[in-house]
Amino acid sequence: MKTRRVVRSPIKKKKRAELLSLEVPNGWEIRTEGNPIVAPYLMNIQDGELILKELNIFLRPQKSKREVANRVLRYLRYVANLHGAVSAQSLKGFKDFLDKSPQSEVNTKSQLFSACKGFVKHLISVSVVQNETLPKNFKNTDKKPIPSFSEIAQRQTSSFEVLLNEYSKSIRFIESEYQLDQAEAITLFFNETVMDFIYEKSLKEVSAALDDIEWIESIIKGTSDSEKEFLKGVDDFSKAYGDFRNEKDCFAILYFNDASNKSVDNWVKGTYDFLKTRGWKSIDIREELQNSASLFVEYSKSLPDAKKNAFKSIQSYAWKDLNPKSIELALKILYSQFGFCIPNSEKWPKGVVDYLKCRGWTVSRVQSAFIPGRYIQRPLLMALLSHRALAPNVDTAFFYTLTTSLTKSIEHGLTNVFMGKERGAGVDVDVKDSDPLVVLLKDYIYRFNQTKAKLSFAKNFFDAENVSIFGHINREKTKNGVYEFSTYDDGTPSDWVRIKLKQYSEKLNLIKLLIGGKGTATGQNFRPTHVVIDVLKGASVGQVKRKLNHANFSTTKDYVARTETAALLSKKAFDFQNFLVSQALNNVDLQALEQEEENFEEFIGERAKRHIEKLKDKSAVRTLLAEPNIVAEWIAYREKILTDKDRLIISNPARWSNHWLIILAEYEALLSMTSTRIFHEAQKIAANIKLPYLD
C-alpha cells in the first residue's frame, strides 16, 4: 500500500475583523452637549461629508464636546475658506496662521492646535487622510497659576488696603507668630480669615437645613390620613384659614362673661379691640348687653349648651391667638397635595408661598426640606471646598463625591474620605469621626439615600454604580409628565460659589473683595488658597504633597513654587507701584514743565522714560505691568486728565500743578514701560471704564 504523500502549503492568515464606528449624517450638524452646531461651510472642503461624519465620531469620548468641536472647527473653517483639503500641509498652514495672530497667548494656541492635530491623527487612523508627518505643536510657556483669594483681592488695591487697616493688630500678631514679613502676614491673614469664615458659615447652614428635613419628617408622621384628605381640597390658604370672627359671637362671649358689669380692661382679651375696629364704643356695647330685647342677646341665648360653655371658657378673642395658620400647617398642605416632590411655587395653593416666604421659608428651602436640593447642597459644596484637611479641587468635590465616599478607616476613631478625580489621584484622607463636616455629611448622605424610597422616578439614579451626593429633582425636564432626578450641569459649581460668596460678603466685608470688581472667585481658587496658607504656616513640600495626593514630588514642588510666588509677588508688586512712581518722578521739576515745553504731555513721557530706565529689571514691575486691568485704569485716568486739562487749569491752577500734573506724570511713566500687547488689550478694557468727575 502506497503511503499518501504529504502536501505542504503556506498557512493563510485570516483577515482580522475590524470594528467600524457608524455615524448617520444629519444635515451639517455636529452633535455636542445641548443644541447641535451647524457647519454648512464644511461642504467647501474636499470629502466634507466624510470629514463631518468622522468629527462626530471623534467627539464621542470627549468630556467637553462643544469646546473641542469649536477648536477643530477653527481649523476646518480655515480650510473651507481656501476650498482645500484636510491634510498635513493645510494643518501646517493653519499653524502658521495661528502663529501670526496677536490675539491669543501661546498656551491658548497650543491647546487649539493640539485639538486640531488630534482630529487629523484620527482621520489618518481611519484612512480618510494620507499618512504624513504632522507639524509639531507650539511650545508651551510657563503655566499661569490659578490665583489664591489674596491675589484676587489685591486687584482692588485701594479697597484691599482700607479693609486690612481694620485688622492691623491681628496682622502684627501673625508676623510675630510665624516670623513673616508684612506682605506674607497680610497674605496669610486674608486667606485664612476668609477660608475659616466660609467653612464655619457653611457648616451652620448645612446643619440648619438638616434640621429642616428632620422637622418635616416629624410633621409627616403626625399627619393623619383624614387630615391629608381634608388638606388636599385647600386651594386658597387665605380663604380657608381667614378671619372667621364676627360681631354676634363677640357679643355672645361678652354676654356669657358678664362684661356689662366689668370694666373694659377686664373683658375677654381682644373682644373690645375687635368691636372698636367696627365702630362700636364701650358705652354702646354695654347698652346692647343690658338690653334683653337686643338681637345680640337673643342670639346668645339661642346657642346650644356646648357653644355656650366654650364661649364662657374662652381666654382670648384676638386673631393672633385664634389664627390657625402656621408654617407647619402650610407644609402639611403641600405634602398632602404633592407628596415629597414639591413643584415650583406657581402650582402651590394660593397664599401659601407668600405666607412661607415672609417667615423665611423660601421655595428652595421648602423643596430641600422634603428632598435635598440646592438649598442644602450649595453650603455643603462650600464646606467641602473650604475644609482644611480635604482641600479638594472643585471638580473632585462636586462631581466625584459619592454616597460611598465615607467609609470606616482601619485606624480607630477615624473616617476615610475618598473623592475621585478625572485625571490623577483625588482625595484619600483619614479624618476624625468627630470632625463637624464628617458628622454632617454622614447625616446628609443617610437622608439623601432615602430619596430612592420617596421618589419612584429616582430609582435609576440611585441604582447606578457611582451615585453623586449632588443629585436633584430636575423640575425643568419631564418625561411623560414626570420629573427627572439627575446631576447638575457642568457650570453649576461656579454659579453656586458666586452666589454663596455674595451672601457671605454681607457678614464679612473682606469677602467683598472676592466678588465683582476686577475678578470674582470661583471654586478653582480654594485649593491654591489652602496651599498658600499651609506654606506660609511652615508646612514642608512633603506635607503639601500628602494633602494634595500628588503622585510625584516634583509636581507638588512646582505647584507650591508657582502658587506661593504668585501670591506674594502679587502683593509686593502692588506695594512696589508707589516706589516705582516716586523713582520715575525723581528730580522732575513739575512746576517748570509748562514753561519749558508747550506740549507738556510729550515732555512728561520723555523725562519719565529717562528716570525709570534703571527699574526695568525689577520682577515686581514686570508682574504689575502684565496686568491688563491695572494698565486699563492708568489709560482711562490719563485720557480723562488730558481731556479735562483746560478746565482743571482754569478752575484751580494750584491744584493742577500740585496734584493733577503729578498724577499725569505718574501714569505716563507707568504706561511707557507697558508692552504693546498688554497696552492694546488694556485699551479695550479702558473704553468701558467710567471715572468720577475730576476737580
Image (spheres, rainbow, N blue to C red):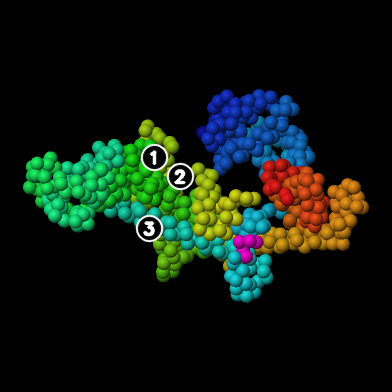
The circle drawn on residue 39 is: none
Name the residue nearer the viewer: 102 or 684: 684
Along the line of sight, the residue nearer the viewer: 601 or 376: 601
Q: State which region is magenta.
A: 161-165
Q: Which residue in the protein does label 2 denote?
A: 487
Give the amino acid at mark 1.
Asn
Inter-mark Cα distance, 3 to 1: 26 Å
Q: Secondary structure at mark 1?
A: loop
Residue 348 % position (x, y): 34, 39
Residue 158, by quadrant, is bottom right
Q: Main secondary structure of the magenta part?
A: helix
N-terminal-most mark, 1 or 2:
1
Task: Out of 318 and 153, give the one closest to the viewer.
Answer: 318
The percent position of residue 657, horizontal first and vertical second, equals 82, 55
Q: Which mark is nearer the camera, 1 or 2? A: 1
- Residue at left offset 47%, top offset 62%: 200
Of tags 3 and 1, the one toward the viewer is: 1
Q: Position of residue 349 (x, y in %)?
A: 32, 38
- Distance from Cα at disc 1 to Cα at disc 2: 18 Å
User: Relative to residue 91, is residue 386 depicted above or below?
Assistant: below
- 10 Å neighbourhood of mark 1: few (<14), some, or many (≥20)? few
Q: Could you say which disc has been placed on residue 443 in the image?
A: 3
Q: Is there any visible trace of residue 160 in the rendered image?
A: yes
Image disc number at residue 344: 1
* Residue occupying the point 12% across, 41% down: 294
Question: Type of residue at label 2?
Answer: Thr
